[in-house]
């Protein structure tokens, strides 16, 4: 028998059957009244997800497209921007800035650690020319969650600086209330907590960010926030909507609303804690012990064992996809994601498979010890 | 009973059940070996579709994204470009050029007519600074097909000028052999002849176009052709692939290969001719009688009848989606598309519904006359 496939990578994440079903319906035209009605519903549902009264823009692209748009629509050529660079996605912010003539001033953070908000405060106080602070909510490459609330409290005091958060793997996983925390731009993507295939990206903008859009002089066309906002007010997108993904989105947003955001956050916390407990019980060290993200758990490969081998055995022998380390973390860590359409038994499966895999690689493991530790957390709220 | 839905708009187009099925399979990871294998297959299949030995890049975006990339990856700020502007999508080329500091020199063509290639030849001879000629293969807003082969023969003589063709509604509909005709950039989209939802875009580049990429200084990041080419050589995309759409793409490309490109072109010719014959038999005039596209037929609304009303009655009473006129053609024309997953009976349905609709609007029609004219063509190769 072909082995069942289990997906525990930090995007794409598993897709619920009803969402797959919605996407498999015969396609309808993107300007048909029935589709416009769907976009109208989605408009409100996205506000719920992003916890904002403002509009949430939607793009037919991956999350990187909305990251690019967040730079090109809010800043001017020659502007300075502070970039928190503690992983692969922090690097991406710096690359995008450089591509468009924005001068990135990078705060380099050791991979696996979070940035100290006081450093950001100092930088902003010392350099009044910094127009934006770019960060991730959850740095997927390291499994670190950054202190977004604290940094937002700092940036809000600087009238000429906006706070731009890549929350592609954060929105719908943990608390990131856009309006309440005074975040200025929050970027999301479809293939994480939203339980959809890749291909849709999102961006919410504060009034402060929209005022930045007015002065921005960087060229843009496909990712044009003003044009999208204008279309959105007619319940449309500026370009042809990615119809099938949008139909799926309406279903997944309904699921999130039915569960309730607080419950969604609790579920992710519980699964993350169980994963961490399972790893620790096997004697493994977390890569980000002090600031672990509830989206993805980065685990250090035991001494003498190549993390890529763990990923490969899980893939080839168990038909389970997790993620390895990237760039400087390659071979040193492996990453188990637990965001989106993931439940109790996905965690038990991956910890159990990890036990077998580690034994195969010669690492001493008491079978069931990791699973036991995970279940001790999971059974509380089954 | 809820009426069956018929989609005959110029994108999105109907999706075959097996393609819907492929997209509804549980999602796999975009770096998983099984997915990389799919991309490897698609790479070759796209070369077949585009009739080229060169690579065909793929983007998670709508066609407009690849149009933008075709400007920003090949040209430099301040470059001059000739834009054939005879419809809404010609206007789009000019807008993209302007957004990125390329100076568009527009040849304005009366809507419904094709450009005279000699005008292009004259412009290129008179102004050696023109670096690119931008055009549509099929101008979807007017139903006009442009003489791509003849224009390619002209542009190829100018070493410092590339020929960039938006063939979003042309590739896989009619003959556009990329290598043979010396086209330099050919842009495609998923929601037309490829029988997929919107969300994927394509671009093939000639060696001449790739040499332009080397000197281009316009900023870009998400749509970075060199970066995509590099990834493609590893059977990957630079950013996360739109996995579900890509799985569907492999199916639709298989269908096109099984049918054979020549047969695909013949099918579109036959359906287009039947549509035109049906319209003419009802006493209607074509908007582009001299250069009608085989993708979409633009038909003039009869005197005193609002074209938008025809679209609306077809939609609300018959549950059939066609397209109205855009901008200056609004109300004056309506457009019936016949590209992608469309067959004999779709044409009979739309002509039959059109007969009823015209009668309802007070236009005298002999019932069955349009259908008869269409069937006379369609029965030849049933």
Image (cartoon, coloured by chain):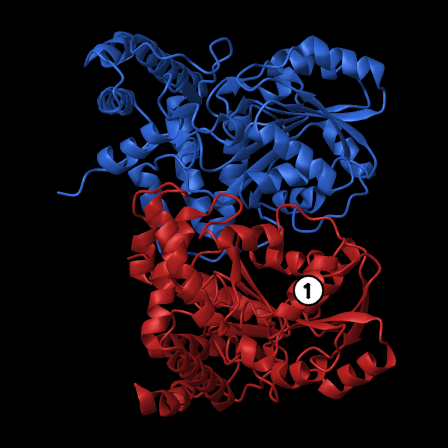
Chain colours: A red, B blue
Disc 1: CA contacts within 10 A as few (<14), some (14-19) or many (>=20)? few
Look at the image and tell me whether residue B62 can be seen.
yes
Whether B229 is drawn above or below B91: the answer is below
Q: Toward the viewer: A59 or A212? A: A212
Name the residue: 49% across, 79% down: A174
Q: Toward the viewer: B354 or A86? A: B354
- The picture places residue B294, in percent across and down from the top left corner, at 44, 18
Name the residue: 60% across, 58% down: A66
Whether B295 is drawn above or below A375: the answer is above
For the C terminus of chain A, which image quadrant?
bottom left
B279 displayed left or right of A320:
left
B200 displayed left or right of A16:
right
Q: Numbered disc 1: what chain?
A: A
- The picture places residue A255, in percent across and down from the top left corner, at 33, 68
Q: Quadrant of residue B205?
A: top right
Whether B291 is drawn above or below A10: the answer is above
Whether A282 is drawn above or below A171: the answer is below
For the N terminus of chain A, which image quadrant?
bottom left
Q: Quadrant of residue A104?
A: bottom right
Look at the image and tell me whether residue A165 can be seen.
no
- The picture places residue A166, in percent across and down from the top left corner, at 61, 68
- The picture places residue B54, in percent across and down from the top left corner, at 64, 30
- Residue at image mark 1: A211
Indicate the secondary structure of the residue bearing disc 1.
Answer: helix
How many numbered marks have been drawn onto this rendered protein structure? 1
Name the residue: 61% across, 28% down: B90
Residue at the extreme left: B1
Name the residue: 71% across, 84% down: A154
């Amino acid at each position: 028998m072909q082995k069942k496939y289990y997906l525990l990578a930090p995007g794409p994440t598993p897709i619920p059957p009803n969402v797959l079903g919605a996407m498999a319906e015969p396609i309808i035209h993107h300007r048909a009244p029935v589709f416009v009605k769907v976009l109208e519903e989605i408009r409100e549902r996205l506000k719920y997800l992003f916890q904002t009264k403002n509009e949430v823009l939607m793009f037919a692209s991956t999350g990187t497209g909305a990251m690019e748009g967040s730079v090109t629509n809010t800043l001017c050529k020659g502007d300075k921007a502070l970039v928190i660079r503690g992983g692969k996605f922090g690097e991406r912010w710096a690359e995008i800035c450089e591509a468009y003539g924005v001068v990135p001033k990078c705060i380099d953070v050791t991979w696996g650690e979070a940035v100290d908000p006081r450093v950001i405060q100092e930088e902003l106080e010392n350099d009044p020319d910094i127009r934006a602070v770019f960060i991730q909510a959850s740095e997927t490459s390291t499994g670190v969650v950054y202190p977004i609330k604290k940094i937002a409290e700092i940036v809000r005091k600087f009238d000429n600086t906006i706070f731009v958060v890549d929350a592609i793997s954060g929105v719908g996983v943990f608390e990131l209330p856009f309006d309440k925390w005074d975040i200025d731009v929050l970027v999301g993507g479809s293939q994480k907590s939203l339980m959809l295939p890749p291909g849709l990206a999102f961006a919410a903008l504060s009034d402060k960010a929209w005022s930045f859009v007015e002065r921005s002089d960087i060229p843009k066309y496909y990712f044009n926030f003003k044009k999208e906002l204008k279309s959105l007010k007619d319940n449309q997108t500026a370009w042809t909507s990615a119809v099938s993904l949008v139909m799926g989105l309406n279903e997944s947003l309904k699921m999130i609303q039915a569960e309730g955001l607080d419950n969604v956050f609790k579920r992710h916390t519980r699964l993350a804690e169980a994963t961490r407990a399972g790893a620790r019980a096997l004697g493994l060290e977390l890569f980000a012990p002090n600031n672990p993200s509830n989206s993805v758990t980065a685990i250090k490969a035991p001494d003498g064992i190549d993390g890529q081998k763990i990923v490969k055995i899980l893939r080839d022998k168990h038909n389970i996809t997790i993620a390895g380390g990237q760039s400087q973390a390659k071979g040193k860590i492996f990453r188990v994601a637990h965001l989106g359409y993931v439940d109790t038994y996905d965690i038990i499966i991956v910890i159990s498979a990890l036990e077998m895999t580690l034994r195969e690689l010669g690492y001493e493991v008491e079978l069931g010890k990791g699973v036991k530790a995970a279940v001790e957390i999971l059974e509380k709220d089954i």
